Image: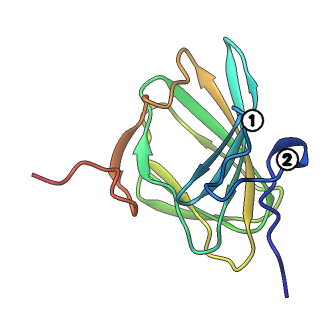
Amino acid sequence: METTDRSGPGGAAATPDGTTGDPRFERRPWGTFTVLDDAEDCKVKRLTVDPGQRLSYQSHAHRSEHWVVVAGRARVTLDGAEIDLEPGGVIDIPIGAAHRVSNPGTDELVFVEVQLGDYFGEDDIVRYSDDYGRAPEPS
């Protein structure tokens, strides 16, 4: 039987609500992310996507992203096209491109995201669709 290590950075055990007390670590409905670097010129995150889960279909006005798959399988949707990536696979997400990543596998997907631009706030997200009710309702 496979178990999933839900510890945060440095091996800190997660509490039942998924927090570790480390402000760099966040639990989301689709998995987790840890901020590895947050500088004026870039932000770097390590993201883990649970099997069968996916992030919002979204775009950013102020940043591009470069993703490197570390473990598992990624299915990337980029402006409507689907691209499958294995460990070592990379993809560039341009500013303004609609994108999402999903985990079609049975193991965790782990990838590193490098954000480049002039603003890296979590509010620089336009959501087009979301499995967790975070996208605006169509009018």
In the rendered image, residue 32, in percent from the top left (x then y), is placed at 66, 52
Residue kind at label 1, given as amino acid type: Asp
Disc 2 and disc 1 in contact, CB within 8 angstroms:
yes
How many numbered callouts?
Answer: 2
- Residue found 82% across the figure and 61% down from its top: 87
| Circle 1 SS class | loop
Give the labeled residue for mark 2.
12
Residue at the far top: name it: 40
Residue at the far right: name it: 10
Disc 1 crowd, CA 10 A, few/some/many (<14, 14-19, 20+): few
Residue kind at label 2, given as amino acid type: Ala
Residue 21 to residue 56: above or below: above
Residue 74 to residue 139: above or below: below
Q: Is residue 35 left or right of residue 5?
A: left
Q: Is residue 71 left or right of residue 93?
A: right
Q: Is residue 98 visible?
A: no
91 or 33: nearer the eye? 33
What's the distance in space between the residues labelled 2 and 1, CA to CA?
A: 8 Å
Residue 4 to residue 94: above or below: below
- Residue found 73% across the figure and 68% down from its top: 108
Q: Quadrant of the N terminus?
A: bottom right
In the rendered image, residue 74, in percent from the top left (x then y), is placed at 66, 64
In the rendered image, residue 24, in percent from the top left (x then y), is placed at 71, 33
123 or 58: nearer the eye? 123
Using the rendered view, name the quadrant where residue 16 is placed. bottom right
Disc 2 crowd, CA 10 A, few/some/many (<14, 14-19, 20+): few
| Circle 2 SS class | loop
Q: Is residue 68 visible?
A: yes
In the rendered image, residue 101, in percent from the top left (x then y), is placed at 56, 57
Give the labeled residue for mark 1.
22
Residue at the far left: name it: 139
The mark nearer the N terminus, 2 or 1, is 2
